[in-house]
Structure formats: C-alpha cells, structure tokens
Image (spheres, rainbow, N blue to C red):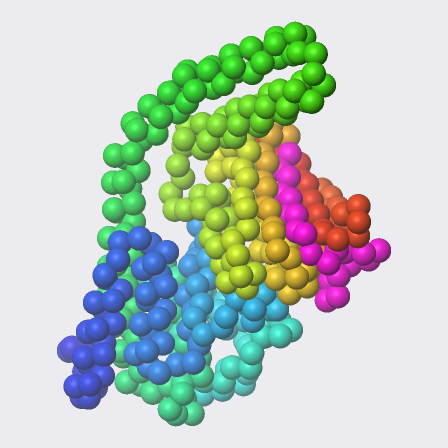
C-alpha cells in the first residue's frame, strides 16, 4: 500500500515534493531542521510549527526549533519547552497524534505565561535509522478547524524524508570533523609555538624599556600596550583550547551560545559581542551546559525587553573549578531592585542555586548599564 494513499489532490502532492526538496537542499543540520519546520507549516497551512529534538536519554528535549513566533514573543515566554504535557506524550508514545482542540486533551498542560493560545494540533515523530530523533509539531490550521487525515499522511511522508536529510547531514558533519582534525591540531601548535611566543617576547621587551622612559604619558601608553598584548595572549590561548578540545557529536556549547547571540540581534537591532575563555566545549558537562544556555537566553531576553541598550557583551569563562557567564549592557540599569518584569532574574538565581552557585546583578557607577554575573562550580566533564 502506498504511504500516500488517500491523497488525491495533485497540488498538495506537488507541495509535498517541493517541501521534500527544500528539506534536502542544505547539508548543515541547523538549517535542515529549520527547513523541515518551515516546509511542514506550508504543507498543511499551519500558523505555528516546531521541531523538538530528543536529548541523549530520549526522555526530554535538547533543542527546539520553532516557526511562527518572533524573537520578542519567544523572549516573553521564557525558557523553551523541555518535553512536558502533549510534547511529553509524543516522546513516550512516538506515533502521529491529531487533536481538534489541544487544550481538551487530559495531558495538555505546562503552557507558560505569555504563550499564545493554540487550538488544533498535529504531532508526528521523525525517525533516523529506526530511532526517534525528535517530533514535529503543527498547531492552528489556518483554513480549517482541525488538521485532516490527509494532512497527517503528508506530514508523515515529509517526516520520513526529513529523517534521511538529518542522517545525511550528520554523516557529512562527521566527515568534516575527521578532515579538519589534522588542520586544527596544526593551527593550535602554530599559535602556541610561534604567535604566543612572539607576543610574549614583545611584551617583555616593552616592560624592560619602561625603566628608560622618563615621559609619564609615554610610559602609560607603553603599559597599556603591554596590557593589550596580555589580553591578546589570553584570547589566543582560549582559541587553542577550542582547537585542541575533542569535538563531541552535535553542536558544541560555543556554537549554541553564538546562535543565541545571533537570535538576540533581531530584537536588539545589533549583534552583541562575545568572549570565550577556557575549555567551553570540553570543560562543561551537559547538565551544566543546558543551564548555561538557559541563563544566556534569559539574560539576553531581559536586555531585549527592558534595557534599551546600545551595546551588549556576553562572556563565558571556564576554569578548572568554576564556570562564569557574564552579560553586560549599557542600558537603563537595574536600579536598587530587579528590572520591571524581573521574573527572569529570579529564574537565573534559581538556576545558579540548584548548582550551588551564585547570581550577582549590578548597575554601573552612574546608574546606567547592568552586569549579570552567573557563577557555578564545576568538576571534570563526564
């Protein structure tokens, strides 16, 4: 029996073919995942679409790609879904699910404040090599009160093609990693053995010359140059750590943080600066990394909603003993208390406390600007 039996509309079949072509048109996994959601939304004329990627244990969601809400709406909702309610039901029972009214199902709960109301629902699992990779969710069919059996058949067909595209992207990523490994090691060695040594020697030379400089202004400029060289060496060492760190399967923390920063740029009107120090990808275990990503997302959301900032800097530092994430902006300042709508700050504080860490919120000396510093202890990554 054909998997598309029951679909007689040639226009819809052409739309399905176009959707499958779109899904397979790119080899970069994040782009593929977004193509899948966008194509599904068009295929069944849904207002909202999302793809939840299962975590390594297969009991929750590690990624959530959504279409239909802008960054401001996402920021007002807060943290992304973790796999509860109907989403959790699909994880436990990965079979197609259609609902006329999402809220009427007994497992429908967990919608946070500011989440847009959603009515009709269609959920379909995506499998890669027989294993469930994640689930595709569509809500609010535009041209009907609920999704049809034909909609389900089309989305199931798209999900099958999506599984092939995801597997192809994963294999290509692995080939790229293997081919780049030797180059990464060579570049790291060159940076350490050549560039850092030359910068270090230049700094020593400048420090030695300070004693012979009588002009106070010139001496201060030389000291500033030495400090700048030290900062440059620090950044290069961080880059060496990143090059030498074993690459885990999938995207690393660095890539995920950079993605959050890029997404925040839409709401800010500019892209925040980013600074990394230490073994970001290898020195942080996955549970702590999940909390870190939630903290960076929430802190940037607070800046977008409340700060009115013109500059933002995100920095993440990993040492042998602790992880420190800092978000600094030049906006209106936190004042004596939390910013309006500061439930997000309480969430950041809770995420620190569950890891035996701390959160510090401070305004600048002139009352403008805010520094959010989230600090937690860490041990060796498992």
Q: Position of residue 58 (x, y in %)?
A: 44, 55
* Snapshot quadrant of residue 45: bottom left
> Residue 372: within the magenta?
no
Residue lying at the far bottom of the rendered structure? 144
Q: Nearer the viewer, residue 72 or 227?
A: 227
User: Where residue 101 sits: x, y (%)?
Assistant: 49, 86
294 over 237 or under it: above or below: below
Residue at the limit of the structure toward the right, as seen here: 336
Number of on-image labels: 0
Observer able to see residue 266: yes
Residue drawn at x 53%, y 57% as measured from the top left: 270
142 or 63, which lies in front? Answer: 142
Q: Does the magenta stretch include residue 330?
A: yes
Q: In this view, does 99 lie above or below 350?
A: below
Quadrant where the N terminus is found in the figure: bottom left
* Residue at 45 percent of width and 27 percent of height: 240
What stretch of residues is rendered in magenta?
A: 322-343
**Image-based side of 153 in relation to 292, left or right:** left
Expressed as whole percent of the image width and height from the top left, the position of residue 11 reads: 20, 85
């Amino acid at each position: 029996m054909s998997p598309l039996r029951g679909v007689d509309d040639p226009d819809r079949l052409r739309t399905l073919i176009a959707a499958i072509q779109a899904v397979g048109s790119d080899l970069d996994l994040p782009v593929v995942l977004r193509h899948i959601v966008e194509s599904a939304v068009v295929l069944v004329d849904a207002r909202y679409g999302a793809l939840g990627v299962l975590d390594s244990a297969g009991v929750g969601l590690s990624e959530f790609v959504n279409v239909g809400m802008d960054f401001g709406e996402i920021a007002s909702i807060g943290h992304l879904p973790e796999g509860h309610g109907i989403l959790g039901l699909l994880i436990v029972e990965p079979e197609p699910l259609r609902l006329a009214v999402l809220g009427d199902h007994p497992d429908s709960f967990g919608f946070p404040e500011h989440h847009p109301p959603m009515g009709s629902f269609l959920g379909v699992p995506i499998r890669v090599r027989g294993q469930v990779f994640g689930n595709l969710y569509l809500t609010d069919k535009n041209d009907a009160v609920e999704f049809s059996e034909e909609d389900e058949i089309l989305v199931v067909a798209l999900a099958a093609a999506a599984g092939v595209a995801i597997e192809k992207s994963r294999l290509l990523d692995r080939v790229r990693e293997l081919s780049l490994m030797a180059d990464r090691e060579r570049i790291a060695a060159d940076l350490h053995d050549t560039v850092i040594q030359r910068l270090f020697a230049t700094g020593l030379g400048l420090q030695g010359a300070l004693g012979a400089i009588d002009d106070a202004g010139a001496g201060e400029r030389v000291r500033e140059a030495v400090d700048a060289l030290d900062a440059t060496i620090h950044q290069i060492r961080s880059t060496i750590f990143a090059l030498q760190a074993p690459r885990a399967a999938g995207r690393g923390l660095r890539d995920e943080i950079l993605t959050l920063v890029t997404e925040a740029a839409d709401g800010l009107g500019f892209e925040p600066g980013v600074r990394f120090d230490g073994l970001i990808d290898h020195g942080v275990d996955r549970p702590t990394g999940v909390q870190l990503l939630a903290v960076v997302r929430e802190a940037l959301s607070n800046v977008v909603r409340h700060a009115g900032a013109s500059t933002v800097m995100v920095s993440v530092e990993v040492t042998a003993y602790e992880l420190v994430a800092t978000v600094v902006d030049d906006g209106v300042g936190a004042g004596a208390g939390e910013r309006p709508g500061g439930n997000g700050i309480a969430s950041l504080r809770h995420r620190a406390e569950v890891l035996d860490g701390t959160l510090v919120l401070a305004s600048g000396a002139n009352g403008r600007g805010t520094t959010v510093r989230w600090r937690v202890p860490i041990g060796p990554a498992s």
